[in-house]
Image: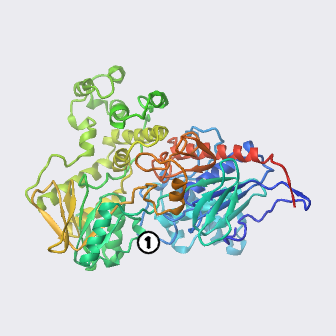
């Protein structure tokens, strides 16, 4: 498969008569990361039914980065950067749980693929590299990745480099499954604009090229994008420039230039999510530090002396919850129950846009509570009073958000620690105030230790039931479109946190004094007299930290108006609709881009975090009816129907 932008990746060209030609339909996909790869897999799966095995088309893939992983999952990243999902929980292939019209095409999860890699490597060792058959070639890996694959288990957290190799393999397999004769062109370019009439062929303009790609349909699968700074970030950058400070705005951590963060100096870090975890790794192990086990088994950090001191805080003041480290045994929570298709239909039938807090959140809270108490009653009956059937009947009868739910739960669940308290989960440091900075450090270490213990103890398996319910809820929410940003942060805090070993490392860094916690409701101000940034929090009244460096440890918001992606901004300028929070508006049925009158474009589609149908994560967990699979299947089928209709157009004379 060639990566040359001027040559097709697929070698088979369809036969064309020299006198009359029916031009093959042409598709341009902008973006070549996991979303584009998953879409190509669904196009290949649905093509035999909707387009015909013998009907090739041309596919142009536009992205400056290699297909499969794209920018975020590109192979040239630090080996210190991990995935935040276990290998057995990452798949690019559909299964029987996925609600879709197209066929199921099973394939290996990351963990299963790694096992196949090990098997292929063993075959090569026995036969010799010159005897390896073609089917085994996609498994060939560089030595360092082959060693990682050999050591990977289902419960391991792979490096992003290994995930990139998995995604490349999925991409190549999916391209090979396209209809015979299909030509795939890979363009290592940036698309900057799409033009063309609603009822005619589209032109995709590439940076630095005078002639556009002409397409019958265009799909945007742009992934995470850089953004122009908002007013606060512009002011902080200007202050840093004036006083010769360091300010790193929100961006993908692997792209950040952290070389300006000096050894031993304080750095204020705003954010305790996954971007912070990446930053932590790059500034500690990435600068020569190492971890060891002490005599009591506790993890100890041995500094290199090149680390800065990270003063880290956020709105909640605590890191994201660790990934759950055990599997669910027994019955899965029977969700959706109180927030499913019928409830979403009812919300959509109301006049006007539903209010999230008033109309949607009470249904979600009842759904999460149902999953929690179902698991508590069925798996831990010694901790409840009464039978599940009686509790379920009363629970179902209580209106969402009713105080009667609290009364019912208090009577049936004696220990308050066994009750689901979503407000406390969202604001873990809302009440406590600490007399000094050191007291906060001890309290935060205790919080993290308790979280690690709980997330690895099946005695708390209702937590895993709630996690599965969160996935179900996300799958329903995509039909409602733009629901604001709070939900996405809440979901990530509970369900998309770092691997447990990362929080164990954070504890070691805290004990070593390399990381210092700031607390909840962290605010950052500037001091023009002293020429420094100053951070304080509600957790330690009167305490402030000064630093000459500030890092915003988070991804930029995916808004259309502030995106640095020229294509996305030009689409909006040319009439594509944006939601109130600035996401590209698309049809929930098939991801067609909507104009400002609400009309879906017949030839333009968009998928990903820049749209109001963004799914819950980069990758799907097996057997969870993942929204991304459902979206990809629906979009692929709409695209193929469009191409089938276009294939009947008149021939043109050569």
Q: Position of residue 346 (x, y in %)?
A: 46, 27
Q: Which residue is mark 1?
A: 78
In the image, is residue 66 above or below residue 586? below
Query: Dividing the picture into quarters, in which one does residue 358 lie?
Result: top left
Residue at horizontal 73 percent and vertical 42 percent from the top: 49
Relative placement, left or right, of 40 versus 90 is right
Q: Position of residue 628 (x, y in %)?
A: 53, 47
Query: Dividing the picture into quarters, in which one does residue 544 lie?
Result: bottom left
Residue that extends furthest to the left in the rendered view of this protein: 435
What SS does tag 1 mark? loop
Relative placement, left or right, of 300 versus 529 is right
Residue at horizontal 30 percent and vertical 64 percent from the top: 505
Q: Position of residue 523 (x, y in %)?
A: 21, 59
Q: Position of residue 250 (x, y in %)?
A: 36, 63
- Image quarter (top left, top right, bottom left or bottom right) of the N terminus: bottom right
Relative placement, left or right, of 519 versus 420 is left
């Amino acid at each position: 498969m060639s990566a040359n932008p001027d040559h097709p990746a697929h070698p088979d060209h369809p036969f064309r008569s020299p006198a009359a030609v029916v031009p093959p339909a042409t598709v341009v996909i902008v973006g070549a990361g996991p979303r584009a790869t998953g879409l190509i897999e669904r196009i290949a799966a649905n093509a035999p039914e909707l387009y015909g095995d013998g009907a090739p088309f041309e596919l142009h893939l536009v992205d400056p980065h290699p297909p499969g992983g794209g920018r975020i999952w590109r192979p040239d990243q630090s080996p210190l950067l991990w995935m935040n999902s276990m290998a057995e929980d990452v798949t690019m292939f559909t299964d029987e749980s996925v609600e879709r019209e197209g066929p199921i095409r099973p394939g290996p999860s990351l963990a299963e693929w790694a096992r196949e890699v090990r098997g292929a490597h063993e075959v090569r060792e026995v036969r010799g590299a010159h005897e390896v058959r073609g089917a085994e070639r996609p498994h060939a890996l560089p030595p360092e990745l082959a060693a990682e694959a050999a050591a990977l288990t289902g419960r391991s957290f792979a490096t992003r480099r290994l995930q990139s190799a998995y995604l490349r393999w999925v991409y190549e397999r999916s391209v090979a499954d396209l209809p015979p004769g299909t030509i795939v062109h890979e363009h290592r370019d940036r698309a900057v604009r799409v033009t063309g009439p609603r009822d005619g062929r589209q032109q995709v303009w590439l940076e630095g090229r005078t002639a556009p790609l002409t397409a019958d349909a265009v799909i945007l699968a742009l992934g995470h994008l850089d953004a122009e700074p908002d007013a606060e970030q512009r002011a902080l950058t200007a202050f840093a420039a004036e006083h010769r400070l360091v300010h790193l705005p929100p961006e993908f951590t692997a792209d950040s230039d952290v070389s300006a963060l000096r050894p031993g100096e304080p750095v204020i870090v705003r954010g305790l999510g996954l971007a912070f975890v990446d930053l932590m790794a790059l500034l500690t192990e990435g600068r020569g530090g190492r971890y060891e086990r002490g005599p009591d088994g506790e993890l100890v950090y041995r500094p290199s002396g090149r680390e800065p001191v990270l003063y880290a805080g956020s709105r909640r003041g605590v890191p994201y919850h660790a990934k759950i480290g055990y599997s669910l045994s027994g019955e899965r929570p029977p969700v959706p129950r109180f927030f499913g298709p019928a409830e979403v239909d009812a919300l959509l039938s109301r006049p006007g846009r539903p209010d999230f807090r008033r109309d949607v959140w009470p249904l979600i809270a009842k759904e999460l509570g149902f999953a929690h108490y179902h698991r508590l009653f069925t798996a831990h009956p010694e901790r409840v009073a009464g039978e599940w059937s009686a509790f379920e009947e009363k629970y179902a009868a209580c209106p969402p958000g009713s105080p009667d739910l609290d009364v019912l739960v208090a009577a049936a669940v004696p220990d308050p620690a066994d009750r689901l308290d979503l407000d406390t989960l969202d604001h873990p440091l809302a009440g406590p105030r600490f007399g000094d900075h050191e007291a906060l450090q001890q309290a935060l270490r205790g919080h993290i230790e308790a979280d690690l213990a709980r997330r690895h103890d099946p005695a708390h398996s209702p937590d895993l039931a709630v996690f599965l319910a969160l996935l179900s809820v996300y799958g329903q929410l995509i039909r409602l479109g733009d629901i604001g940003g709070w939900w996405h942060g809440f979901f990530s805090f509970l369900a998309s946190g770092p691997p447990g070993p990362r929080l164990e490392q954070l504890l070691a860094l805290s004990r070593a004094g390399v990381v210092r916690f700031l607390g909840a409701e962290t605010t950052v101000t500037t001091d023009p007299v002293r020429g420094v940034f100053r951070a304080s929090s509600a957790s330690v009244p009167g305490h402030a930290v000064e630093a000459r460096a500030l890092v915003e440890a988070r991804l930029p918001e995916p808004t259309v108006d502030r995106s640095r992606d020229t294509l996305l901004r030009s689409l909006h300028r040319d009439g594509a609709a944006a939601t109130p929070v600035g996401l590209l508006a698309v049809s929930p049925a098939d991801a067609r881009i909507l104009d400002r009158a609400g009309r879906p474009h017949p030839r333009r589609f968009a998928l990903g975090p820049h749209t109001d149908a963004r799914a819950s994560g980069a990758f799907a967990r097996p057997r969870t009816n993942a929204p991304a699979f459902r979206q990809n299947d629906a979009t692929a089928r709409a695209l193929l129907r469009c191409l089938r209709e276009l294939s009947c157009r008149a021939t043109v004379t050569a």
